[in-house]
Amino acid sequence: MIIDCHCHAGRASGWRGPFDTSAPLGRYSKRARAAGIGRTVVFSVFHHDYAEGNRAVARIVAAAPDHLTGFAFVHAERDKGRIGALVREAVDTFGFRGIKVHRYDARITREVCKAALEHDIPILYDPMAEVDPLPLIAGEYPGVNFIIPHLGSFADDWRAQNAFIGTLARFDNVYTDTSGVRYFDLLIEALKAAGPGKILFGSDGPFLHPGLELAKVRALPLRGRDLGLVLGENARRLLRLGESRGPAVPKLELHGALVDP
């Protein structure tokens, strides 16, 4: 199964851009099906209240549990003191399989790492090119798996992406996803340095086209089992898909689910 490990969903109250306004999945879902993507990891857009945002994502997942897996989004500073409770609700009630943190909100904290450790789930952390602290974080929390999207920078910062490859290769608990990486040769360098077991396919949908992002992976010099690792097996293993970890369907009313036609 092809698994897209990086997709936004839901609606928030911002107007700075689609990343904090709305991420409907109707068009994405059609494109994903056409590309052969069988499951997608979804998490909230940037939100003024991630408790509300995560519950909205839970309703979306409940509408398509055979194709969607949820991650809990948390704000490392604004949610200080309640991150454990937010993650516990997401895992135990909604059946979510990971945590999303973005430096656009705030830098990752020990509280976030401890919540991931407690529930044995990965963290998808976007450092926005601030990759220097990642060896410190990964070294201090070897029991937590960190997925660093975009090779460390969505902003086309090849210096940060190039620097991150060393961390990716060095630490067993550091992974990356392919979403939004424009410098294709850096993906090849990451593959050579860290191997196919450290790279996950991600699209950054619905903002980026999943079929186009998947084409990048298929263009990599990968065949057979190695290609299968990147396309889905790595994500399946990290997220423990197939294992029972809470309700199969979130126990929420489906009213208001944002899966458009």
Image (cartoon, rainbow, N blue to C red):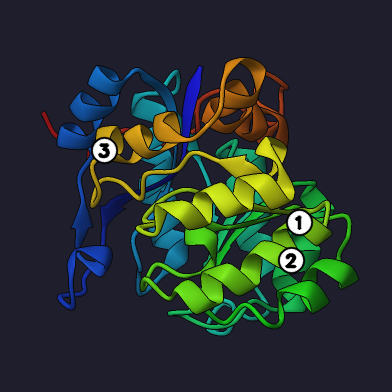
Considering the numbered disc 2 on the image, is that residue within a helix, a strand or a loop? helix
Residue topped by disc 1: 169
Q: Are marks 3 and 1 in contact (CB under 8 Å)?
A: no
Q: Residue at x 37, y 71 (%)?
A: 156
Q: Earlier in the sequence, mark 3 or mark 1?
A: 1
Looking at the picture, how far across and down is residue 74, in whole percent? 54, 67
The three-letter amino acid code for the residue at tag 3 is: Leu
Q: Of 250 and 215, which appears nearest the observer?
A: 215
Q: Residue at x 22, y 36 (%)?
A: 28
Task: Say if residue 40 shows up in the picture.
Answer: no
Mark 3 and mark 1: span between their CA atoms?
26 Å
Looking at the picture, how far across and down is residue 155, in whole percent? 36, 73
Residue topped by disc 3: 212
- Compared across the picture, whether 189 is left or right of 208 comes to right
Please tell me the numbered disc located at residue 167: 2
Q: Residue at x 71, y 23 (%)?
A: 244
Q: Are marks 1 and 2 in contact (CB under 8 Å)?
A: yes
